[in-house]
Amino acid sequence: MRYTHRDGAIRLAAHCLETLEAHRQRTRFHRENGGQLFARYSDGVLVVEQATCVKGARSRFSFHPNRGEEQREIDALFEQGLHYVGDWHTHPEGRPTPSTPDRTKMLEIFQQSKHLLPYMLIVIVGLEPFPAGLFLGAVESGQIIELACCR
């Protein structure tokens, strides 16, 4: 799936989408899940190659990742040439949107992370099939901009 932000392109690779799809909250008994997004630039396109799953406290309506595990994952995948570019998690709603805690957390991550990116990403996986059931946002200084899929 392909998205654009300003004058750049973002592509969610097939492997990344498979991981997101596999963790969708399909029943009322499924708890939220989440992880991190890792990418590399290829021909001027930010290609999100991997969505990982991290351990953490999970309930039907919340996910709180293990920050130590996340940092170890960032370090290990950086050694493989992949850059941490944001986070993803699920929501038990058809067309997902970021909650106030989601927005606060991602804006804090953007401000506190050591990176050269003009933005980071937030992905929320909802119940509807993609692309309607997938929120992709660009996290910038002070705001989150929803990106539209252009397939």
Image (cartoon, rainbow, N blue to C red):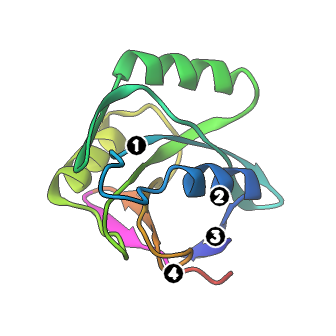
Mark toward the start of the polypeptide (2 vs 3): 3
Is there CB contact under 8 Å for labels 2 and 1? Answer: no
Please state which amino acid type lies under the numbered disc 4.
Answer: Ala
Q: Nearer the viewer, mark 4 or mark 3?
A: 4
Per the rendered image, the range of residues in magenta is 142-148
Tell me: residue 134, above or below residue 27: below
Residue at mark 3: 8
> In which quadrant of the rendered image does the N terminus lie?
bottom right
Is there CB contact under 8 Å for labels 1 and 3? Answer: no
- How many neighbours does mark 2 have within 10 angstroms: few (below 14), some (14-19), or many (20 or more)? some
Is there CB contact under 8 Å for labels 4 and 3? Answer: no
Q: Secondary structure at mark 4?
A: loop
- Could you say where residue 150 lies in the image, as x and y percent from the top left? 64, 84
Residue at mark 4: 148
67 inside magenta stretch: no
Residue at mark 2: 17
Closer to the camera in the image, 64 or 8: 64
